[in-house]
Image (cartoon, rainbow, N blue to C red):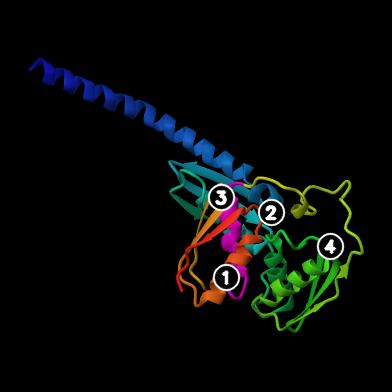
Amino acid sequence: MKKTMYQSVWIVAVAVLFIINGPVFASDMDDRIESSALESHVFKTFLKDDDVKIESEEGVVTLTGTVNEKDHKTLAEETVLNLPGVKSVDNQMEFEGKVSSEDSDPWLITKVKSTLLFHRNVSATGTEVLAEDGTVTLRGEAASQAQKDLTTEYVKDVEGVKKVKNEMTVLAAVQKPVGKKIGEKMDVVIESIDDASITAMVKSTLLYHRSTSTLKTTVETKDGVVSLGGKAGNATVRDLTTKIVNDVHGVNKVINNMTV
C-alpha cells in the first residue's frame, strides 16, 4: 500500500515539474529557432536587405515583414522550415516591389540571376544579365573559360530562355583576390554553411533549372552532405541533378538516392 502511495506521489511530482518547466523548455527552443534563423547563411547573405520578422511559439513559426525579391519569400520559409525544432511555418511576408509578367524580359533577368546565385563555380555578382525577347546576353568577367562555359550552360537551362549570347571576358591570369568584399566572390572563400541554408538553396536551385524544376525531389542535409530522394525521368536527369546540387554553396557531398 505504501509502495503504491509513493509511486503515486512520484508520478504527481514528475507531472508538476513537467508543467512548471514545460513552458521554459518551449521558450528556450523558440529563442533558439529565432536566433538560428537570423544567424543562418541565407538570412545573413541573401535576406540581409529585407525586413523579415520571425516569431516562434512552441515550434510554430510565423514570418512577417517584406522582401525585395519575390523568391526571397520562399527562400526564407524553406530555411526556417529546416531548422531543428520547427514544426510548421506560417509565411505572411509580402513582396514589396513590382510584379513582372512571367513572359517579360525583367522576369527572365530575375530568373537567370536567381539561377546563378547559389552556384559556387560561377559568379552571380560579376555577371551582367540582359534580356530581349527571350535572348539573354551575359557580360562581365569570368575567371576562366570553364567558368564562362558553365555560366552559359546554366543560363540555357532557365525556363523562358531561347538563346544565350555570352560576351563575358575571360581573365588572362587569375590572381589571388586582394581586399575583396565579403560575399563578392564566395567560391574563393571556404566557409561553413548551416544545413538549413544548404537545404533551402538546393531546393531553390532545383526549381530554377528547367531540367529539374518539375521533379519532386526530397532534400536532406547533414553536416554539408546532401541526400536526394524522389524519382528522376531517366539516368541523365538524375546525373544532372547531382551535378547541379554539387555546385551549390556549402555542399560537401551529394548522395543521390533518386530512382529512375
Label 3: few (<14), some (14–19) or many (≥20) C-alpha neighbours in 10 Å: many
Give neighbour class at mark 2: few <14, some 14-19, many 20+ (Cα, 10 Å).
some
Element under disc 2: loop
Q: Earlier in the sequence, mark 3 or mark 1?
A: 3
- Direction from residue 97 to residue 231 in the image, left or right: left
Magenta-highlighted residues:
194-214
**The N terminus lies in quadrant:** top left
Residue matched to label 3:
196
Say whether residue 93 is visible: no
Please, which residue is most extreme toward the top here?
2
Instruction: Locate residue 11 relative to residue 111 in the image: left or right.
Output: left
Q: Nearer the viewer, residue 51 or 153?
A: 153
- Foreground disc of the pair 1, 2: 1
Residue 80 position in % (x across, y down):
54, 50
Main SS of the magenta segment? helix
Query: Circle 4 is placed at which residue position?
Result: 143
Name the element at disc 4.
loop
Q: Secondary structure at mark 3?
A: helix
- Cα–Cα span, label 2 and label 4: 23 Å
Q: Which residue matches tag 2?
A: 46
Pointer 1 residue: 239
Q: CA distance from mark 1 to mark 2?
A: 28 Å
Secondary-structure class at tag 1: helix
Q: Amino acid at mark 3?
A: Ala
Q: Is residue 121 above or below residue 238?
A: above
Label 1 packing within 10 angstroms: few (<14), some (14-19), many (20+) = few
In this rendering, the answer to whether 233 lies above or below 57 is below
Percent of width and height locating residue 132 = 78, 81
